[in-house]
Image (spheres, rainbow, N blue to C red):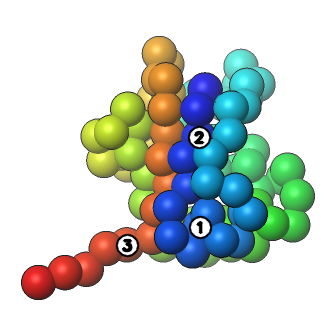
Amino acid sequence: MKLVYFAWVRERIGRPEEILDPPPEVTTVAELVGWLRGRGEEYAYAFENEGVVRAAVDRVHAKPDTALAGAAEVAFFPPMTGG
């Protein structure tokens, strides 16, 4: 699965993207975030406040309970504002 990181999420993790193979028990966006947090302090720092970071699964905004089955890409980004 390709993971893509944007803005300060990318800065905290230290890379713009990576290919990872989460374990089979990781089936939702929330479980993926939890698994990533355990991969090291840079991930723990990026996802320290789970309610802030947003996700998109295959370029569609996703909620924490969104299933990952068949997903090719998951992107993480901070909340966006604009005018």
Q: Using the rendered view, name the quadrant where residue 9 is placed.
A: bottom right
- The first of marks 1 and 2 along the sequence is 2
The span from disc 1 to disc 3 (Cα, nearest Å) is 11 Å
Instruction: Residue lying at the far bottom in this picture: please name it.
Output: 83
- The first of marks 3 and 2 along the sequence is 2
Residue type, label 1? Val
Q: Quadrant of the C terminus?
A: bottom left
Q: Residue at x 50, y 61 (%)?
A: 6
Judged from the image, the secondary structure of the residue bearing numbered disc 1 is: helix
User: Would residue 77 be found to the left or right of residue 49 on screen?
Assistant: left
Residue type, label 3? Pro
Q: Residues within 10 Å of mark 3 (few under 14, many from 20)?
A: few
Disc ID at residue 9: 1
Residue type, label 2? Leu
Residue in the foreground of this view, choosing between 14 and 81: 14
Q: Which residue is mark 2?
A: 3
Disc ID at residue 79: 3
Q: Residue at x 59, y 40 (%)?
A: 3
Judged from the image, the secondary structure of the residue bearing numbered disc 2 is: strand
Q: Residue at x 33, y 39 (%)?
A: 59
Judged from the image, the secondary structure of the residue bearing numbered disc 3 is: loop
Q: Is residue 20 above or below residue 11?
A: above
Q: Residues within 10 Å of mark 1 (few under 14, many from 20)?
A: many
The span from disc 3 to disc 2 (Cα, nearest Å) is 17 Å
Q: Residues within 10 Å of mark 2 (few under 14, many from 20)?
A: some
Instruction: Residue lying at the far top in this picture: please name it.
Output: 70
Q: Residue 71's x, y, as percent?
A: 47, 23
The span from disc 1 to disc 2 (Cα, nearest Å) is 12 Å
- The first of marks 1 and 3 along the sequence is 1
- Of the residues tagged 3 and 2, which is closer to the observer? 2
Q: Quadrant of the N terminus?
A: top right
Q: Is residue 35 above or below residue 53?
A: above
